Image (cartoon, helix red, strand yellow):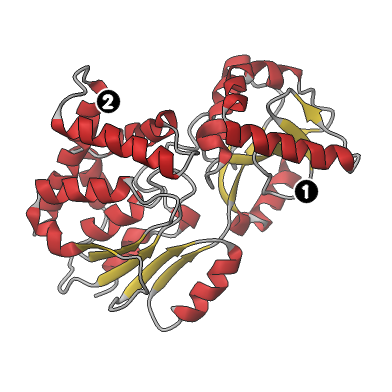
Amino acid sequence: MTLDARIDAFSELGSLLQNYLESSDQTANFSQKLINKIRQAEIQNAWFTPSQVNHAITAWAEILNSQNLKNWTSVYDFQVKSPKNVAIIMAGNIPLVGFHDFLSVLISGHKVLAKLSSNDKVLLPFLAETLIDIQPEFKDRIRFTENKLENFDAVIATGSNNTARYFEYYFKNKPSIIRKNRNSVAVLSGNESESELKTFGEDIFRYFGLGCRNVSKLFVPENYKFDTFFESIFEYKTYIDHHKYANNYDYNKAVYLMSSVKLLDNNFLILKEDSSYASPIGCLFYETYKNEEQLQNKLESDKNKIQCKVGHFDFTETDFGESQNPSLSDYADGVDTLKFLLALN
């Protein structure tokens, strides 16, 4: 199968997703099947509400077109002589979080052996079946397993810092990409408009804050006033109506209050001054900075803990509201997945 054929297949998958989103006729075969899968996904994992799943589908529908795929692949040398079996151990924190690895392996000409997270076992297999319907040659290139991984040549594994140690030992004799815990940060200057801060709410709340590209840590200038920030994100108050989010918010608030921790709170988001990067659900850590140079040096020294940096500074690369809309070349942990795969020959 040629690269052009693979691009055409994924582009057609993108068109199906776009038609599902745009069509008022939800009785079409693909749309009805996808609606059923979205319902199943929410039953399996209550964090995967239809709204959140549809956001992930929208992102991939916009990306998966011929032009984007050709632009992405055009900077690489595709000379895969013998397809390798690439095992992908997927996370399950947000809907379709493993799709980029799935796409990268197949677009490179290799074969996928995927081990799904128990939290996200419905959506990707359905899209894989659809892809095979579009291009039957993918049938022998896609496998899912719940058993021990066997007969693979390389691995891409995503997990926590603890599981990464296990992965590094277990896969020490295989070419690998091993991903650990990372969090995203935002830097405010104090001059942001209300509309910018409103957009910024998307970086915090999308997927209930469960993604590594969700902002979990905020850097603000000394003596920063949070009034405008709280007013700007008020529309996200409906997140507290989701029982799992509310339970986490209430629990974390109770723990902090019992420990006499000083908090800022608007009844659906807790702000806590903390030097850590990983804040719990319903909470956003913040830290003050004295000057840009000092902060830039700190973020550079902690770069292995950070997925992306949101803001309008020279050292932040992501605009407000865009952290959950990465491009095809925005690789997790800054490791070029496609370059890794194409070097497996």
Q: Residue at x 62, y 15 (%)?
A: 194
One can see residue 311 in this view: no
Left or right: 258, with 164 as reference point: right
Instruction: Label 1, secondary structure: give it.
Output: loop
Q: Residues within 10 Å of mark 1 (few under 14, many from 20)?
A: few
Q: Which quadrant does the N terminus fall into?
A: bottom left
Q: Nearer the viewer, mark 1 or mark 2?
A: 2
Q: Residue at x 79, y 44 (%)?
A: 274
Q: Percent x, y for residue 316? A: 58, 40
Depth check: 311 or 83 in front?
A: 83
Q: Amino acid at mark 1?
A: Ser
Above or below — where is 336 with respect to 175?
Answer: above
Instruction: Label 2, secondary structure: give it.
Output: helix
Residue at mark 2: 21
Q: Residue at x 47, y 37 (%)?
A: 324
Report the disc number at residue 275: 1
Q: Residues within 10 Å of mark 2 (few under 14, many from 20)?
A: some
Quadrant in the picture for residue 116:
bottom left
Depth check: 251 or 183 in front?
A: 251
